Image: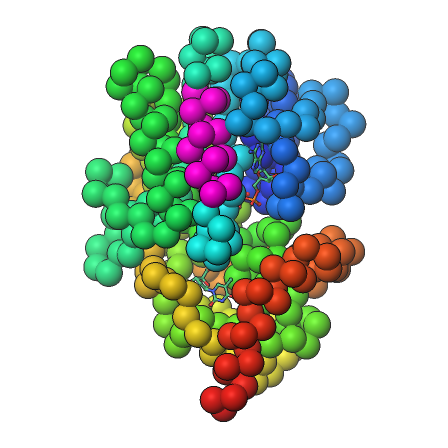
Amino acid sequence: MKLLVTGGAGFIGSNFIRMYMGDHPDCEITNLDKLTYAGNLENLRDVENDPRYHFVHGDICDREVVDGVMPGIDAVVNFAAETHVDRSIGDPEGFLRTDIFGVHVLLEAGREHGLDRFVQISTDEVYGPALSEPFPEDAALNPRNPYSASKAGGEYLARSYFITYGFPVIVTRGANNVGPNQYPEKVVPLFTTNALEGEPLPLYGKGDQERDYTHVLDHCSGVATALERGEPGEIYNIGAGNHMKNIDMARLILKEVGKSDDLIVHVRDREGHDFRYAIDSSKLEALGWKPAYDAEAAILDAVRWYVANPDWWKPLKSGDFRKFYEKQYRARLEEADQSS
Ligand code: NAD
Ligand code: TYD
């Protein structure tokens, strides 16, 4: 199988490429990535000289670039996206561009090139908050921030290509991933690296929100299952059912790195913060998928990776990240200081 993986220099895409190449000696993978702040070629140093792997630096919104990489491709797995909810609240435009328009460009090019499969990587966040039962795939969507709304737009468009043109689209909706190589804006790497540096852990609100902390390798094996065994036109949830409250996740991290709970600072909540995500993944399980990590094992595996790899994350926490951090957290941390 010749795969085009987009966004393969990011967190999940790089873990997927490594896993897929390991499991499929005959595959060939082209990684098309724009290398935004979240793209990092360090994530794929171990495969970059493998003759089955090719990297192309480019934007999925650029039709000429996309047409240039399509010849010979059997299937696309579209990971490329703007992905951070807080950034989408501050500046949504780039999310609309990549997460909706970029999907459109890939679909148009893919249809013209007669692909066998197109996997659109979506998120459980499109369902909005799950306050009771986990959502099955046919639940109504209720995206509530510019990130999840853009992802919902992208997947609606992808599914419309199946219905309208019979283009073989599969959509996956993954839960919160944790594991190696996650950019330190997301909560587990942010809290782990802050704890290691003796910095506060800015916990939004009371920290009683819940996420389904699924190991990135479990998400990647779910994507591979959907790619290989999924039905065109279908949607597959991918969540391990690893629910944990954010406050408990923060305490687990601090305990693992030997730091005091005093580093937790309750700060002003995220605007429109979705309280809880929960999805029912039995449809994918029926295809043979089974997660290997529970919540604690998934989070601790991530934490230990950051402890062992400061050379990977320390350079990322300077420069542009610092500017984002100041904008996102400085006022929140100062307010919290004044009220304590
Ligand atoms: P990430 O932010 O770590 O990486 C995104 C990658 O896409 C980067 O390498 C970036 O350079 C690239 N990219 C961005 N815009 C691009 C463009 N216009 N053209 C080409 N490349 C571009 O993201 P991630 O956490 O690895 O997420 C990957 C996918 O999985 C996304 O579609 C995201 O919505 C989805 N997802 C993520 C999670 C999660 O917990 N992280 C959960 C469910 C679904
Ligand atoms: P995040 O990693 O941004 O993922 P998402 O919002 O896409 O689920 O956040 C995970 C949870 O952690 C979410 O409930 C918000 C919370 N959180 C904090 O409490 N503090 C932070 O600094 C961040 C980034 C997130």
In the image, residue 61 sits, relative to residue 328, either above or below, namely above
- The percent position of residue 333, horizontal first and vertical second, equals 55, 77
Quadrant that contains the N terminus? top right
In the image, residue 124 sits, relative to residue 48, either above or below, namely below
Is 283 contained in the magenta span? Answer: no
State the extent of the magenta-drawn residues as a range.
93-107
155 or 270: nearer the eye?
270
> What secondary structure predominates along the stretch shown in magenta?
helix
In the image, residue 283 sits, relative to residue 180, either above or below, namely above
- The percent position of residue 118, horizontal first and vertical second, equals 43, 22
Query: How many marks do you count on the picture?
Result: 0
Asked whether the viewer can see residue 129, the reply is yes
Asked whether the viewer can see residue 278, the reply is no
Is 95 contained in the magenta span? Answer: yes
Residue at the limit of the structure toward the bottom, as seen here: 340
Residue, x 39% and y 76% (percent of image)? 206
Picture quadrant of residue 100 = top left
- The percent position of residue 81, horizontal first and vertical second, equals 51, 38
65 or 300: nearer the eye?
65
- The percent position of residue 340, horizontal first and vertical second, equals 49, 91
Residue, x 66% and y 37% (percent of image)? 35
324 or 295: nearer the eye?
324
